[in-house]
Amino acid sequence: MAQAAFEDVVEDFEFLEDWEDRYRMVIEMGKDMDPMPEALKVPATKVEGCASQVWLHMTPEDGVFRFQGDSDALIVKGLIALLHRLYDGLPVSEVPGVDARAELGRLGLHDHLSAQRSNGLRAMIERIRLEAAA
């Protein structure tokens, strides 16, 4: 089961019939994210495999998974916002068990992202899973 914040996105997507509106919503979610400090945008937080510049900084806080992210591409920053709603606040032990592909599939993203964006999204998910398992 996804986080309540992600379930809210699923519900909002159901009301938006046009994919242009859905893309705008994802982009706005990215714009609304708290900014990631520049000091965290270092090679160690950069996600390889993305066409855009992507940084994810993850930290466990008292057994709870927390992460920040940023990208130089608006749609990718929106995808980071989706992942944030899916993962942030979960117990660290639950993060590897989240089927992000299935959860994001509920939004119909797989049919509307380019191959490069899909590959980048997979790279971000894999990075999150690896960090949580470490």
Image (cartoon, helix red, strand yellow):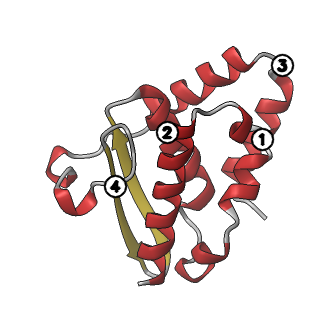
Work out how far the residue at label 3 is from the one at label 2, CA to CA, in angstroms: 24 Å
**Do residues under tags 4 and 3 come within 8 Å of each other at their CB atoms?**
no
Q: Secondary structure at mark 3?
A: loop
Q: Nearer the viewer, mark 1 or mark 3?
A: 3
Q: Which residue is mark 1?
A: 10
Comparing labels 4 and 3, the label whose residue is closer to the camera: 4
> What kind of residue is marked 4?
Val
Tag 3 near tag 2, CB within 8 Å: no
Disc ID at residue 47: 4
Q: Which of the labelled discs sits on residue 116, or is there none?
A: 2
Q: x%, y% of residue 54?
A: 34, 45
Q: Quadrant of residue 96?
A: bottom right
Q: Secondary structure at mark 1?
A: helix
Q: Amino acid at mark 3?
A: Glu
Image position of 55 (left or right of 38): right
Residue 31: x %, y % from top left: 44, 28
Which one is in front in this view, the residue at disc 2 or the one at disc 1?
A: 2
**Which three-letter amino acid code belongs to the residue tagged 2?**
Gln
Residue at mark 4 to residue at mark 2: CA–CA distance: 14 Å
C-alpha gap between disc 4 and disc 3: 32 Å
Label 2: how many Cα within 10 Å (few below 14, some 14–19, many 20+) = few
